[in-house]
Image: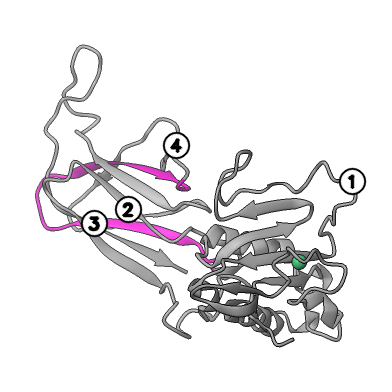
Amino acid sequence: MTWRAANSLLVLEHQLQAGAPRAAPPATPAEAWGTIGDSLHDPGSDHSPKDFPGLGNDVVTALDIPHAPALGLDSREVCDDIRRSRDRRIKYMISQDQICSSYSTGTRAAWTWGPYNPNDPNRDRHDTHAHISVVGDARADDRSAWATIGAPAAGEDEDDMGQSFGPALMRSEDMRYPMVIPPVRGGLADPRPTWINAAFDLGSSPVFLRFWAGPGDGSMRPLLGGGHEVVRLESCHVFSMELDAGVRVLSVLRVPDPDGPKDADGKPTGPISDAPVSFCFERQ
Ligand SMILES: [Zn+2]
């Protein structure tokens, strides 16, 4: 029978073996890097060649990768890197008795880990390898690098997120300003720390800003501690602060001078500056 593996999986296999060379065969058995299934695999498995409209006939859409942390290849970390990147090629991944899919199910949100077949005592617990399935359409042949071990380093290709990004401009009419950024210290793919910088142009009065940050799951926390401290920005001075790991969303709010006039409840009532403020993000 003639069959082929989806190109994205061949790219991943090659990328991992190049990025973790000590874990490449023969240090790990070649079978631990399986695409096509053996006789023990359920013929319904993605390891069995199937026909996909838009992708082709007799295509295998699954790859196993060995779990060999001592050799530099932690299969769970690889899955977590890919999970955080929300790669559009992923259907689901199985690792360490858990499954994570790009879609939600009755018991699990998309891109979160949950139990894998917990009621089957004979299930493969995926302790010695991880399983990665890609979607059954043209995306499965996308040859882009994966955001994990072996990904091109900064400057090597167009996937580079850059040493810095921005600037972004909060205009006079913006009372709040949301920004989304690549995850800070986003796993093995990009472990660099990130700073946010802010400044505004020549002007006489300072600008007061409150910063909120969150990982993109709806929860936001003040960037400067529980008292919701206000940043006092002086004309042409740069405010710079390192962001916590995992931050993906920021929101900046214009506020009055906290030391200015207050109402009876102690709430600041002073004027709110509308000076345009520029932000940029800097990676180490
Ligand atoms: Zn598998």
| Closer to the eye: label 2 or 3 | 2
Label 4 CA crowd tier, 10 Å (few <14, some 14–19, many 20+):
few
Residue assigned mark 4: 225
Q: Is residue 39 above or below residue 258?
A: below
Quadrant placement of the N terminus: bottom right
Give how far across and how far down residue 98 sits, in percent.
Answer: 74, 51
Tag in front: 2 or 4 = 2
Residue denoted by label 3: 199
The answer as to whether callout 2 falls within 8 Å of ligand 1 is no
Q: Earlier in the sequence, mark 3 or mark 1?
A: 1
- Magenta region, residue range: 190-216
Looking at the image, is mark 2 or mark 4 earlier in the sequence? Answer: 2
User: Number of labelled discs?
Assistant: 4
- Looking at the rendered structure, the kind of residue marked 3 is Ala
Amino acid at circle 2: Met
Q: Secondary structure at mark 2?
A: strand
53 and 196: which one is in front?
Answer: 53
Residue 14, x across and y down, in percent: 66, 84
Whole-angstrom CA distance, mark 2 to mark 1, is 46 Å
